[in-house]
């Protein structure tokens, strides 16, 4: 069996696919294609500025400690 991706441009085409599925010739799989959103865009503005600044300072401090740590 082979899986193919088909773009439906007309409702009649979707009905034809459903008919073929009823005849057990094909199986219709639903897959919505949505553009991936950057995480920076997705979470932009979700934290209050003061909390975000505190978090950024903590992360920078932790990285500095890690980089300066000698084994």
Image (cartoon, grey):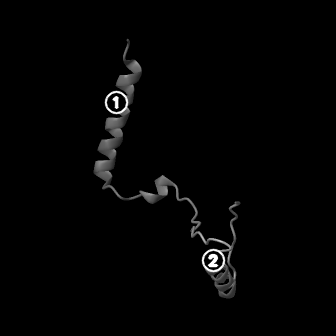
Mark 1 or mark 2: whose residue is earlier in sequence: 2
Residue 61 in the image: above or below residue 20: above
Quarter residue 53 falls in: top left
Foreground residue among 4 and 64: 4
Foreground residue among 9 and 22: 22
Residue ID at (59%, 69%): 29
* Label number found at residue 21: 2
Question: Dot 2: within a 10 Å radius of its alpha carbon, few (fewer than 14), some, or many (20 or more) residues?
Answer: few
Residue ID at (30%, 56%): 48
- Image coordinates for residue 11, horizontal then vertical, percent: 65, 86
Foreground residue among 22 and 41: 22
- Image coordinates for residue 27, horizontal then vertical, percent: 62, 71
Residue 64 in the image: above or below residue 4: above
Quarter residue 9 falls in: bottom right
Residue ID at (31%, 36%): 58
Q: In which quarter of the image is the C terminus?
A: top left
Q: Which residue lies furthest to the front in this view?
A: 23
* Label number found at residue 62: 1
Seen in the image, is 19 located left or right of residue 48?
A: right
Q: In which quarter of the image is the N terminus?
A: bottom right
Distance of mark 1 from mark 2, alpha carbons?
57 Å
Secondary structure of the residue carrying tag 1 is: helix
Residue 5 in the image: above or below residue 24: above
Seen in the image, is 4 located left or right of residue 57?
A: right
Mark 1–mark 2 CB contact (< 8 Å): no
Secondary structure of the residue carrying tag 2 is: helix
Q: Which of marks 1 and 2 is in front?
A: 2
- Image coordinates for residue 38, horizontal then vertical, percent: 52, 55
């Amino acid at each position: 069996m082979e899986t193919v991706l088909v773009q439906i441009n007309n409702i009649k085409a979707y009905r034809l696919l459903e008919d073929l599925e009823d005849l057990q010739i094909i199986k219709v799989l639903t897959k919505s294609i949505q553009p991936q959103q950057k995480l920076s865009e997705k979470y932009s503005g979700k934290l209050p500025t003061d909390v975000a600044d505190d978090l950024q300072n903590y992360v920078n401090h932790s990285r500095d400690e890690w980089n300066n740590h000698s084994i």
